[in-house]
Amino acid sequence: MPALTDSKAFAASRRARRPSAWFALAGVAAASAVAPALCQTAFAQAAAGSDAAGDSLRVPATPPDGIPDAPPASGMPSNTASDAATFDDAFADTETARTDEAGAMAAAQPQATAIEADPSAPVAAGDDSLAEPIPMASGPARPAVGPNELYGPPTPKVDRGQLPIIGWSEPPALVPPALDEAVHIVTRNYPSAQAARSALRAAHSDVRSAKWQRFPSIDGNVSYLDDTNSPQPQISVEQPIWAGGRITANIRRAKAEEDVTSAQYVETVQSLALTVTQVYYEIARLTLRQQLLAESLAEHRRLVETMERRVAQEVSPQADLELARSRAAQIEQEYTVSRASRETNLRILAQLVADPSYDLGPIPHFDPSIDLPAKESLEEQAVAFDPQINRRKAEADVNRAQLDLTQAQILPQVSAQYSYSEIYGSRVGVVLRSQTSGGLSNFSDVSSARQRIQTAIENVRVAEQELRRNVAADIINFEAAKARAAISSDAALTSARVSESYTRQFIAGRRSWLDVMNALREAVNNAIGQTDAEMTALATAAKLLLESGRWRPIFADQAEVGSNAEARTPIIQETGQ
């Protein structure tokens, strides 16, 4: 048996292949009633990064006869040229059937457009048929965020009946354009974001309602009390003169509750952005993992065929063939699990963006020199920006206003009153009103209100400490993932060379078939470990950017966005600070 593919060629082709691959989200299940085209995903290899013109890297939805529809790429060792020819012939009928199927699907529905395999190129968002398109500002209109600057969380408020629309700051260089666009779409159109916007409008109406308590209240009725059925009107108009602080406390509480609702809106937006980011990088990780497993499964099946010939010629024992089949079955199981997980995440992202044809762009490229500038500032930036901490502070303000209201209810209130009735006529006077409920329960309510304030303050501290722990853990995980990627890269190259050597030694009778299978298994495990570490590093970096406010939501007026003038203003202007 000739030697396996040279490991240097494998490493070179792997480096050329990885950044140039692209993947498009067209849905998850072709038979789904929600979207018939859901997740018809293709992988293409740019001509500049491939030596064999016309080759494509595909991860099939269903492997024909248990064999993945993917030619053996350089990520795994290969066998003889004759075995490769036999392997290609076995796929000829499958490729023809798949080509016919793809042509039929192309005639039935529009296909996603392929993009250039350049990670820095802008990505077309596909057919964005959302009812409310996102106005996108160009270039300098999107402010960049400095690595050492502290930004407080945005506080969107209703102004003159209009709630500012949401936008995003200029993303850092490591954020893919397709991810940036997906975050725009989801944070503006997803139902939970729309519900939070409606709640913010309702809170603003509550503030206006509380301010109306300063104005007179009118009470009128008409009664019929005699045999003539003549109407007897009664009117009472009361204007508060001194309410002991009730009205002011009610207004303060309504404003604090509006601040709580505003912080909840920003918290919802950040949570959606984190979810989209996690799903995006999980799809990328599973895409690479599924591709590697497809290559490994193809190589295992080629070895099974080789061992079948050796057993038929009575060169190798039957046990070696059973071992090869067992290992191939294990790889196929992992391939099936990986494919299911990937399709699940594709379905989630398709529902988030509400666009089954959304183009996910090129697979994110991992640069070993990637780093987050000013990592020592990330923790303080996260604490200053975190909308959850801002919400807890606003809840403390609500409790303070409630304490003032509870104390004011102990005091009497004075009002000017005008009344008219059929019996007494018109009267004008001053009303002194005092009311208690349940004895001296108002004094106990004051004590409980003070304790709720302390509870809210402690909740702020708990949220801050939890955030600091999470950010510190994310920074550690980011550095660890970078180190794992570097180690796994060396391990992948080494294991490929070991697998090649063991194959030659098996032919010479110096290694057992078990050694060959173990080396092949180790090669794919190291390759998967490398891709997992790379995508984990990128996902953790994006998460830290969102948590620290370096990549953050901003809010601008509809008129400003429409004119593209200062469409994404600095947060100092947004919050009124």
Image (tube, rainbow, N blue to C red):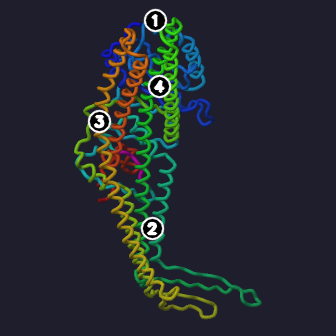
**Magenta residues, as a range?**
163-168
According to the image, label 2 marks what residue?
A: 207
The residues bearing labels 2 and 4 have C-alpha atoms spaced at a distance of 49 Å
Element class at badge 3: helix
According to the image, label 4 marks what residue?
A: 113
The residues bearing labels 1 and 3 have C-alpha atoms spaced at a distance of 40 Å
Element class at badge 2: helix
Q: Is residue 164 magenta?
A: yes
Q: Is residue 19 visible?
A: yes
The residues bearing labels 2 and 3 have C-alpha atoms spaced at a distance of 50 Å
The answer to which image quadrant residue 108 occupies is: top right
Element class at badge 1: helix
Q: Amino acid at mark 4?
A: Thr
Report the predominant secondary structure element of the magenta stretch: strand
The answer to which image quadrant residue 61 occupies is: top right
Q: Amino acid at mark 3?
A: Lys
The front one of 521 and 150 is 521
Left or right for 365, reference 93: left
Q: Does label 1 or label 2 sit earlier along the sequence? A: 1
Vertical order, 16 against 401 (above or below): above
Q: Does label 2 or label 3 sit earlier along the sequence? A: 2
Residue at screen point 38% across, 76% down:
450
- Give the label on residue 139, or none: none
The front one of 126 and 383 is 383
Q: Does label 4 or label 3 sit earlier along the sequence? A: 4
According to the image, label 1 marks what residue?
A: 82
The answer to which image quadrant residue 170 occupies is: top left
Q: Is residue 76 magenta?
A: no
Locate residue 36, reporting x and y percent. 60, 31
- Please name which of the two marks, 2 or 4, marks the residue nearer to the observer: 4
Residue at screen point 46% across, 27% down:
290
